[in-house]
Amino acid sequence: MVLADAADLCTFVDQSPTPFHVCATVAARLDAAGYVRLNERDEWPGEQGRYYVVRGGSLVAWSTESSSSPQDGFRIVGGHTDSPNLRLKQHHDLTSDGLGVVAMEPYGGAWLNSWLDRDLGIAGRLALRGGEHRLVHIDEPVLRVPQLAIHLSAERKGVELDPQRHVNAIWSTSPGSFMDWVADRAGVAAGDILGFELMAHDTAPSRLTGASSGLVSAPRLDNQVTCFAGVQALLSATPVAGMRPVLALFDHEEVGSTSERGAQSDLLATVLERIVIAAGGSRDDQHRAIAASVCASGDMAHATHPSYADRHEPLHRIAVGGGPVLKVNVNLRYATDSSGAALFARACEQADVPLQRYEHRADLPCGSTIGPLSAARTGILTVDVGAPQLAMHSAREMMGADDVDLYARALAAFLAPASL
Ligand code: ZN
């Protein structure tokens, strides 16, 4: 049985151009499965059930259906909702040689070259005068960052891109107010927009490519694959008695996770504490539940690039289509230790999927992820895992179609282990 279909991943990604939309897309799937959205300002119900909360671009969902004690452990799959992109500056209306140009700024470690010559839409969140937020997803090709013609490049070998000067986008043949245009498309009065987080996205649809449609070409695979596979795993896993499955998706990973809703925030710790309190537990019960908990922190992994195989640790090549990846770093850029490695290896065995083990070359800077941060914040044993992909942080990334389901099946087994 397919838990997570690659074509469905494409739908998920195309519905989710921003972290806020990732939360809305996940929430719609949770709603359809009978999960109840809770407000952090309300008292939470003590009844067993399926619940979730959204804090800005972050979301935590859990099930207590098979839990009978406030001391029961949590089985957590973590991920992040944000991806590198170009975002609109507060004052953004530039005029240049008669063209309407908007000032953009890179978010996270965007590969700037990959944003050139693409037809970009604009999406995000508007804070309106009445106090509410409005999600906007304008999937029209309104923005474009054209690259310099090769004839105007002195050595004809490309231009080093400056994040200040070279990612501004042309949007009109005449100067004007870009926010007026956004307001018109969003159906709100421009004067009512008191705050915004707006970001560009590629309007070309995600699609299956390659012979036999064996590859996925899509933006934001890092890390919407984990958001997608994680929610499919949560919805498919039959909860194990005495265990509470949790899906925790955080915003702001690409910029260090330090915010009120990032992996370094109190979000997950607070939600877990409130689940224990709602179940009638004490502070000691809370600590006992944490001690019985484990987390698989999911983020994408580097598949070996055929043209740059030398960039990989020789015995740790990662195959596209080779299954989920266990990430290990002795300097704790990844949280994995032997206990966590064994837990995830057992989950892969249970799901009957292959497991690949990754270590970064010692002479290249290893990236990091939410695993070590969340582990430090909560005190929960954490293992860093992922699915293989190419072109990480490009505006358009790539992975094997089969890896989507293999990854989801491993996460589902982690959430509902056959044995402890
Ligand atoms: Zn990531």
Image (tube, rainbow, N blue to C red):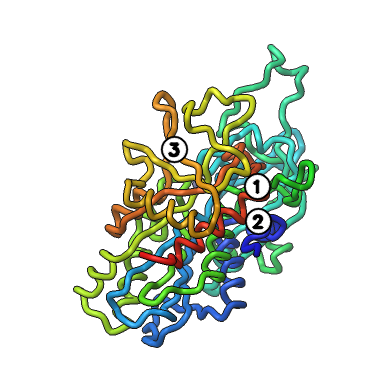
Judged from this view, the residue extending furthest toward the left is: 284
- Compare marks 3 and 1 and give the one earlier in the sequence: 1
Question: With respect to residue 91, does 98 lie above or below?
Answer: above
On the image, the x and y values in percent for residue 62 come to 45, 72
Q: Residue at x 47, y 60 (%)?
A: 249
The quadrant holding residue 114 is: top right
Position of the N terminus, as image quadrant, is bottom right
* Secondary structure state at the residue bearing disc 1: loop
On the image, the x and y values in percent for residue 65 come to 44, 81
Residue 378 visible in image: yes
Q: Residue 367, which numbered label?
A: 3
Foreground pick, 379 / 381: 381
Q: Residues within 10 Å of mark 3 (few under 14, many from 20)?
A: few
- Compare marks 1 and 2 and give the one earlier in the sequence: 2
Q: Residues within 10 Å of mark 2 (few under 14, many from 20)?
A: many
Disc 1 to disc 2: CB gap under 8 Å: yes
On the image, the x and y values in percent for residue 272 come to 34, 70
Cα gap from disc 1 to disc 2, whole angstroms: 7 Å
Q: Is residue 367 left or right of residue 224?
A: left
Q: Residue 13, which numbered label?
A: 2
Q: Residue 219, which numbered label?
A: 1
Q: Is residue 350 left or right of residue 41?
A: right
Q: Is residue 170 left or right of residue 129?
A: right
Cα gap from disc 2 to disc 3, whole angstroms: 23 Å
Number of numbered markers:
3
Whether the residue carrying mark 3 lies under 8 Å from ligand 1 is answered with: yes
On the image, the x and y values in percent for residue 173 come to 80, 42
Q: Residue at x 57, y 40 (%)?
A: 393
Question: With respect to residue 65, does 352 lie above or below?
Answer: above
Cα gap from disc 3 to disc 1, whole angstroms: 19 Å
Q: Residue at x 36, y 86 (%)?
A: 46
Query: What residue type is disc 1 on?
Result: Pro
